[in-house]
Amino acid sequence: MAVLMQSILSGILIGGVYALIGIGLTLIFGVMRVINFAQGELVMVGMYVTFFLFRGFGIDPFLSVVITMPALFILGALLQRTLINRVLDALPQNQILLTIGIGLVLANTAMLLFTSDYRILSTSYSSSSVSVGGIRLSTPLLYCFAITAAITAALYWFLVKTDVGHAIRATAQDRDAAQLMGVSVRRMGVLAFGLGAGLAGAAGASRRPGRADVLHLPASRRRLHSESLRRRRPRRDGQHHRRDARRRPDRHRRIAQRLLPRVRLEGRLRLRHLPRRPVAQTLRPSRQESHVKTALFWAVPLIALLLVPIWLTSPYPLHIFILLFIAVAMGESWNVLGGFAGQYSVGHAAFYGLGAYGAFILLQDKHVAPWYGVWVAVAIATAVALIVGSITFRLRGPYFVLASIAVAEIIRLLALNWKDLTNGAEGILASDLPALHFGNRLITDWNSKTPYYYMALAMAVFCIAVNFLVQRSKLGYYLQAIREDQDAAHSLGIPLTIYKNIGLVISAACTALAGSFSAFYIGFIEPQAVFGLDVSVQVVLICIIGGIGTVTGPMIGAVVLVLLSEALRANLIAQGLFHLGLPETSATGMFLKENLAHAHVLIYGILVIVVILFMPDGFVGFFGTRLRRRASR
Amino acid sequence: MTAPLLEVRNVSRFFGGVKANLDVTFDVETGMVLGLIGPNGAGKTTLFNCITGFFPPSRGEILFEGKRIDGLSPDKVCRLGMARTWQKVRPLAKLTVLDNAVVGALLRTKSVKDAREIAHAQLKVVGLATKDSTLAGTLPIGERKKLEVARVLATQPKMILLDEVMGGLNARESEDLIQLILDIKTSGLTQVVIEHDMKAIVRTCDRIVVLNSGEKLAEGTPQQIVNDPRVMTAYLGDSGGAKA
Ligand SMILES: Nc1ncnc2c1ncn2[C@@H]1O[C@H](COP(=O)(O)OP(=O)(O)OP(=O)(O)O)[C@@H](O)[C@H]1O
Ligand SMILES: [Mg+2]
């Protein structure tokens, strides 16, 4: 009984902190209809501010709320003024992506600056507690609850009693009406975001500075992951020594430096092959001659790619190509749903990971060869997709985006905790792949990169073909109609839920396929690496960089993203800066050299923000319209 | 005599306390053009939304070809052969004019090729054939309205509901659309048109239903309606209402 009461009371006390975060979110959503995905990261910033105030000036964590809240208010207002304000009238999915981008930038900047080590903060009363009627309550938790309650009360007073509070609530109820009454909606937005951030800051400041005493960083997990990836890296390269983990990473760096220019050139060549009117969202008439032309247009690069492994035998460039093909396959898969139907999924990691785990577990536990296991995994992903789709596609608005994120997260937690099946956070290392036979003939024993290369190429071509077929079929027309205007589509006889589900299933199945393949290629999976939000964001990024709803867009996006992340890994950017005159031995130089290689996610975040703000139609749209404008001049 | 194509029986639709439609009853016979008029906010668009399944009626029945359709989803209603245009036009902005119509035509065929032919024919009917590769989002308002009609015709319906297709158009464009409605009438397709312009209504309609504050105020031939004093008061009583 006492235990129960104890838990309930502690729960309520901790709940206070979450209430602060929640009120902040609601305030922002209420006033601006923007769901702020960076709220958690703002809490994190609040924690850091608190921590450094304590460390540097010995300010008690609870007192520091007085500084943390205004500081976060300013940060929030600034974010709103400079970034969020620009997308208030944009699609909700773009707003969500923008806040996700902001979150990634905040989290990963913090990680770069402060490293992912846990910071521990202990005060004189950290472990003290008071006892009420046999129930012990920790002192910090009590203080924390008191502060939370005080802040909530103050906020209530502000919203209900003051003029500005009235204006904020008016804006929340009806933006247009408020505007007509002379309320500056933009100003209210800034205020609301500032307040929301301030509350997050307060929550961060007061968040259990007692026992846990730990800055819990979303980023820390990511760092751990990239750390473990780095440890594994050697295995990815020298295929002839798949098991030899002692190859020196420097060597790869050297190989990378030698080979990257060539890869880049390839990238540029492909860019030049763009169709002259690349905004292919308009469906091109399917005349016979244009079929022939299209076929020729794609046949040439395809044949070239088929020949690549014959004259390129060193593993690194093949590795890059394989990564590229995987990225293309994933982007094209996402595009079916996000691009054509306009239903943004920010949870495709769920399908990617299900593909990976499904096939891996089948091989490991049941000795099912991957080329059979994959299809089981694809079926599982499809089933999950159908469940999610049937529930969320009935609702309009950003629900699908939210649900997709939630589902990926739930499955990640499942994978993390269902240790019997998944081996938890330790992940699974692939055993050797069984050799592939066709009849009695040995096709491959997977001892070099070449079979992987052809498999990846086939997969990418398959996904591109799926997009082509979809685009030119009734399905494609219907999905695009849904993207453009759901009511119009509905009134023209399109059953919305069914078609969205078809799009989702195709997309999920292809993504699961790509997930299985890339898991076997890398040879190791763990929950964060395959189910993490950054995987989902990366897929979306491939498409929005290239251009959503076009077949060429994801290919361009994949080239950009893969080359960028490889350049980061090989530290080419820091090298470039040194070439441009940045002294290598300066503090900044050292810092960049040390850290830039692990900053992918940060760079992704920045990319998301830039693309959403400045080229929402991606490269294809951005350069396409420019090209056409020039042509018509 | 055969049963009416569309029967609206005691249909009411409430939004909270607002009675957007109250106990509206009328029939539409095959082949006729029925005019639906009334001041702003009279509930005309709401009635279209009820008939085409966007809002189920709060009360009452709607029968199409003798079968109940109230409660069906919009796509099912459209498949049964009733298609509507939107007062606030809804072009599929990033698709071409032709592809907009193709989306409509795909209701009756799986083949994109066939759909293209149907779509092209309907664009000719409304006079947009020369613009077929323009992006719909870049059309001027007059042509957007025509595109709405072409798209609806492409679904090969038995009946179309046109919601203010002349709203916001200049005299010449309106004249085009009046001709279009008359042409469609000649082809035998049943139409219900919402319009504020009385001259256009009188020229095109066989029968007129007048709505006021959600209720049916009057019904009759154009002559009867024009001479009905109640209709005049309804319009003049609502100062902002009489656009005509
Ligand atoms: N979705 C809705 N929610 C709440 N009220 C609504 C909704 N749709 C319509 N109404 C209300 O129903 C009433 C009738 O509106 P409706 O749009 O049907 O009028 P209308 O006759 O088409 O007017 P107009 O000539 O301006 O197009 C109005 O008072 C309107 O405010
Ligand atoms: Mg209306």
Image (tube, coloured by chain):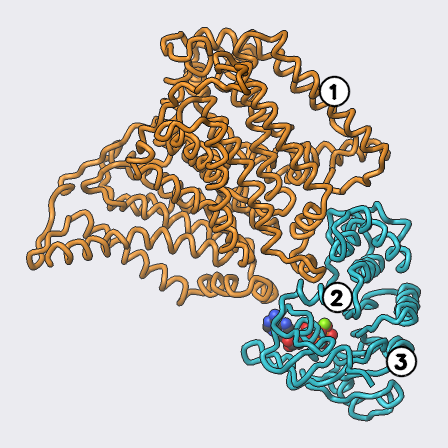
Chain colours: A orange, B cyan
Residue at point 34%, 26% (across, down): A115
Amino acid residing under circle 1? Val
Q: Looking at this view, name the residue that lies furthest to the front.
A: A440
- The answer for how far apart the CA atoms under marks 1 and 2 are is 46 Å
Could you tell me if the residues under marks 2 and 3 are in contact, i.e. CB atoms within 8 Å? no
Chain letter of the residue carrying label 2: B
Which residue is tagged 2?
B83
The quarter of the displayed image where residue A46 is located:
top left
Q: Position of residue A606 (x, y in %)?
A: 52, 32
Q: Is mark 1 within 8 Å of ligand 1?
A: no
Q: Position of residue B215 (x, y in %)?
A: 68, 86
Q: Looking at this view, name the residue that lies furthest to the left.
A: A134
Q: Which mark is residue A300?
A: 1
Closer to the observer: label 3 or label 1? Answer: 1
Chain letter of the residue carrying label 1: A
Mark 1 is surrounded, within 10 Å at the Cα level, by few (under 14), some (14 to 19) or many (20 or more) other residues, namely: few
Q: Is circle 1 on the same chain as circle 2? A: no
Taking depth in this image into account, of A16 and B16 the one nearest to the observer is B16
User: In this rendering, would B159 be left or right of A379?
Assistant: right
Q: Earlier in the sequence, mark 2 or mark 3?
A: 2
Mark 2 is surrounded, within 10 Å at the Cα level, by few (under 14), some (14 to 19) or many (20 or more) other residues, namely: many
Which residue is tagged 3?
B202
Amino acid residing under circle 2? Ala
